[in-house]
Image (cartoon, grey):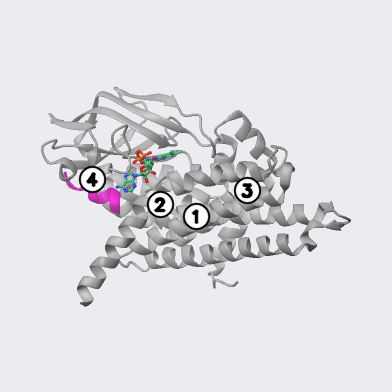
Amino acid sequence: MDYFLTEQQKTIKDLARRIAVERVLPVRAGLDEKEEFPWDIVHDLAAADMFRVFIPEAYDGLGGGCLDLCLVTEELSRVCSGVAVTYAASALGSMTLMEYGTEEQKKRYLPDIASGKKLAAFAITEPTAGSDAANIKTTADKVDGGYLLNGTKQFITNGGEAEIYTVIALTDRTKGARGASALILEKGMDGFTFGKKEKKLGIRTSATRELVFKDCFVPEENLLGRPGTGFIQAMRLFDKSRPGIGAQAVGLAQGALEAAVDYAEQRVQFDQQIINMPVVQHMLADMAIQVEAARALVYAAARFVDSGAKAVTESSAMAKVFASDAAMKVTLDAVQICGGSGYMRDYPVEKMMRDAKILQIYEGTNQILRSAIAVNLRKRKARTA
Ligand SMILES: Cc1cc2nc3c(=O)[nH]c(=O)nc-3n(C[C@H](O)[C@H](O)[C@H](O)COP(=O)(O)OP(=O)(O)OC[C@H]3O[C@@H](n4cnc5c(N)ncnc54)[C@H](O)[C@@H]3O)c2cc1C
């Protein structure tokens, strides 16, 4: 299908695909096996200006929007979803800065993220605050000249590897989520350390770590936006970033579909290629339909975000839920089509199936997002009644 991308978007997509095929493909199995952070690939992406894609031109970026970011993420995820999330998490860690940062803050941090010299990360989740993100306990008490941060963030992508962190913490613990604020932290600040690196089912090349704050002093000038707006900033961020998770899902599902077609063409049973068997053909056709429907919804949701529309919560959630469910189903079917070989690490589909699961969990589980969509349906009905 033609999605009428601009010439610049086609160029970005082609370049991301080339890096994925030439640089990621040869090392993806090893990175997964060793659970090794993909620094060499991060450097390749930086050299190809891929981190500039999502940063405004005024701060050394290319000024791309949500769709541009989705195109790069999709192409990387077609080969390795762990690499794709490492890249996309740097965008996640920069987005609130781009939207709420002062000129001085943007000048200080964004050019280094654009050049790929520094990775970024975003941290809201805590041991007691996952789906119930409003229940965060990390505190940022006001002291002379800044804030004193105490608490632990859990499951943070790029944790330990990133240099720049957007952290949501309570600056007024009496007000709950309304007392939350966003702060910029830098690796190396006194009192800011990293806890254990998680050992994961999938996306194993990506780093997922705890962030630990013990009387960590954060200067006043590192506050993002007004005090008390941190939770709202986080929710608006996810509205804009969820099409990116959808794009990760589309790329992953596309890669699994292609691997399944390749296998079905070369595998002979009962004296014929299994791709000639109607049952296999129908499975492949259903997989292709899921991938294309997911892509269409993700691109539409990304374009809606790029239009500047405010009410993007529902469309972004729909894109994330539909595409991640599609990726789970498509990768499971890809393993099925590859039979016993599909279950072996010599073939890529078992990794793809493992990588798919997280897409239904992070940035809002699919149950939570379905509930949010349903609430909107009722609100809309009430408005039109
Ligand atoms: C690999 C990985 C990377 C991550 N990266 C980041 C990151 O970079 N930054 C960050 O801040 N966070 C990150 N997260 C955290 C992620 O967003 C949370 O794990 C996710 O929001 C779910 O929270 P939880 O794990 O606490 O699950 P819980 O909230 O404990 O949910 C457990 C189960 O209960 C269900 N459930 C809970 N409440 C409801 C409800 N009201 N209605 C219906 N069902 C419900 C959930 O859907 C789920 O099935 C990451 C997580 C992982 C695993």
The amino acid on which the numbered mark 3 sits, given as a three-letter code, is: Val
Magenta span of residues: 223-235
Q: Nearer the viewer, mark 2 or mark 4?
A: 2
Please tell me how crowded label 2 is: few (under 14), some (14-19), or many (20+) other residues with Cα within 10 Å. Answer: many
How many numbered marks appear? Answer: 4
The amino acid on which the numbered mark 4 sits, given as a three-letter code, is: Gly
Give the CA separation, mark 2 to mark 3: 24 Å
Sequence-wise, the earlier of marks 1 and 2 is 1
According to the image, label 3 marks what residue? 79
Q: Residue at x 72, y 48 (%)?
A: 338
> Helix or strand or loop: what does disc 3 sit on?
helix
> Helix or strand or loop: what does disc 1 sit on?
helix
From the Cβ of disc 4, is ligand 1 less than 8 Å away? Answer: no
Give the CA separation, mark 3 to mark 1: 19 Å
Q: Position of residue 371 (x, y in %)?
A: 32, 56
The mark found on residue 325 in the picture is 1
> Helix or strand or loop: what does disc 2 sit on?
helix
